[in-house]
Every structure is written in C-alpha cells, then in structure tokens.
Amino acid sequence: MATTTAAAAAAATNTSDAASAQIQKPDLLPVQRSSDYHHPHPGVNLANPPHDGLHFWQFMVAGSVAGMVEHMAMFPVDTIKTQMQALGSCHMKSAGISQAVQSILKSEGPAGLYRGITAMGLGAGPAHAVYFAVYETCKKALSGGNPNNPVAHAASGVFATVASDAVFTPMDMVKQRLQLSSSPYKGVLHCVKRVLREEGVGAFYASYKTTVLMNAPYTAVHFATYEAAKRGLMEVSPENVSDERRVVHATAGAAAGALAAALTTPLDVVKTQLQCQGVCGCDRFVNGSIRDVLRTIVKKDGYSGLMRGWMPRMLFHTPAAAICWSTYEAAKGFFMEMNDGDRNQSVN
C-alpha cells in the first residue's frame, strides 16, 4: 500500500515537473493585452466611473436633459406665476390665477404663455448640468460612505444651487421680463442689449443674492425630502423596486418639490420683484435689498402679498420635480447600462 502511494506521488511529481517545463518553453509566448484593456478589479480599473456608476460628464448631461425637459414642460405655469407675483408690485392690488391667465390671453393669445421660453432653454440646460454634477460630487465627498445621510444630501444641494444659480440667474431675469404682460422686449437678444445699455451688467445679477437665499433652503429641503421619500418608498415594497423605480422617483420628486416650493414662496416673490423692477409699471427699488423689497410688498399688499403666486408655484414645482427626477434617473440608468457594456467589452 505504501509502495503504491509512493509511486503515485512520484508520478504526480513527474507530471507537474513536465507541465512546468512545457509552460516555461521559450516558444510559448504570453498573450499580449491590447492597450485599452482594463483590469476588472475596481481598485485598479482606471475606466471605472468615479461615483454611482457614472462619469462626471454623464452627470452633467443627465442633469442638463432633466432641466430642459422639466422647465419646457411646465413653462406656461411658470409664466402665470411670474405674472401674479409681478402684478403684486404694480398698481393692480389683486391678481389671481384666472386674472393672470386672462391678462396673458387677452394681450398675446396662447403664444403669450410661452413668451421667454428661449431664454429658459438657454439657461436651464447649462445650469442644471452644473447643478447635478456639483450635487453628485459633493454627495460623494460629504456622505462618508453612508448613502442615507440627510445632512450630506442637504449640504450638497446648497453647494449645487450656489453654483448653478450663478449660471442661471442672468437668463432667468431675461425670461421673467419677457413673461410680463405687454413686455417692452421683442426677444432674448433685444432684452439683453437693452438691459446692458440702460441698466448695466449688474441688472442681470440684481436678484442673485435673493435667489441663492431662496434656493439654498429650497434645495436643502428638496434633496433631503427626495432622498428620504425615495428610500421610504423603496422599503415599502423592496421586491418591486426594479419594476416601480420610475414611479418611486416621480412620487418622491413630487413630494419634495411641493414641500420646498411652499416653504420658499416669499423669497420667490422678492426675486421676481427684483428681476422685473422698472418694467411694465413695477416698482424700482433704491438699494435692491431683500428687506427693502419685503417692506414694500407688505406695505402694499400686507403679509398675504408674500405668498402671492404660491398656488401656481406649487402647481409648477410638484409635477416639475417629478418630471425632472424621473428624467434624471432615467438618463443615469441609460449611462449606467452603457458603462457596464463598455466594461464587459474591455474584460472580454
């Protein structure tokens, strides 16, 4: 028995040595990997997207598409909101949704609901590209590996809005002036040239501080609510998450948009007053401070004037947020599948 075992072991050793010698023959050359080969290990794969399965530029494209779709789809409601908030600063003491709609249709017809949409398109695309790219980058840096960190989500949203508002505010000012009933401007270029000539570059950023002060809490509430609502909805029916992902994103986005819009309406009214000052009979403010605008609104319309346009604002932001988040997540999903396909091809 021992002799048999020893013989088997010797045979195995001889076989192994033969195999090793065969492998070490100089005519058996190693396979050369192509220059674009990437090791599948995530620690050394330079092609791996840096966060959430996407590259930085893909966040920008997804955000840009989401912003364009959101604002274009809801633009008529935004026009109504702007008219209501601007009328509160003019000689008309009351302005409701029906009055604003009648004013628009009477002066310009249905096309008046879309006046200024070009300015919105020029501003929304780049601004949302910056918005979501900064948000995702900050969320990765601040979350500390915890995807359920509401403080990180809120703080990331604040950083994102400061950056995106710097891009969007000038075109938002042009857009709102074009939305006014009987606007003296013929189009985007005419408005830009006239404002530069008559008011200077500073007019384009007259509302920037107010916009940031409004959008910072808006975004903090919005992103924190969205992430929490999305997580909660996914936990309700985890087995159906993949099938109902779009519904989850839309529902969470709508809830976040509605709550954030309601809480920040007074500052939105101030922003509209600053951007439309001196146009179509609206007041011009001496120093453009938030306190000065608030005092003027309360003096003319009382404290209820600070909530002027809250209904169309919520009617805008609730479906707009649902559209935006659904489009954004869908675009991210497209890029994730594309990246997975590229990685699989590299490995094969």
Image (cartoon, rainbow, N blue to C red):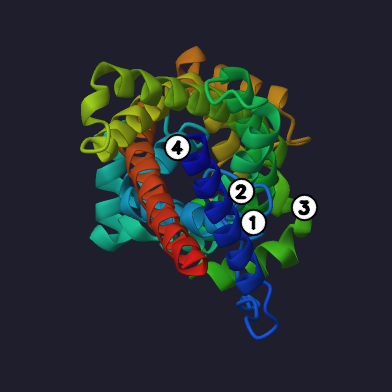
Mark 4–mark 2 distance (CA, rounded to whole Å): 57 Å
- Looking at the picture, how far across and down is residue 202, in whole percent? 77, 52
Mark 3–mark 1 distance (CA, rounded to whole Å): 47 Å
Kindly indicate whether the residue at mark 1 contacts the one at mark 2 (C-beta within 8 angstroms).
Answer: yes
Mark 3–mark 4 distance (CA, rounded to whole Å): 23 Å
Kindly indicate whether the residue at mark 1 contacts the one at mark 3 (C-beta within 8 angstroms).
Answer: no
Corner quadrant of residue 321? top left
Q: Which residue is mark 4?
A: 87
Mark before the other along the chain sequence, 2 or 3: 2
- Looking at the picture, how far across and down is residue 124, in whole percent? 51, 55
Residue at 31% x, 24% y: name it. 234
The amino acid pointed to by label 1 is Asn
Q: Which residue is mark 3?
A: 202
Mark 2–mark 3 distance (CA, rounded to whole Å): 48 Å
Q: Residues within 10 Å of mark 2 (few under 14, many from 20)?
A: few
- Looking at the picture, how far across and down is residue 167, in whole percent? 66, 54
| Residue 42 numbered mark, or none | 2
Kindly indicate whether the residue at mark 4 contacts the one at mark 3 (C-beta within 8 angstroms).
Answer: no
Residue at 34% x, 44% y: name it. 326
The amino acid pointed to by label 2 is Pro
Q: SS for tag 3? A: helix
Q: Mark 4, mark 2: which one is toward the viewer?
A: 2
Q: Which residue is mark 1?
A: 45
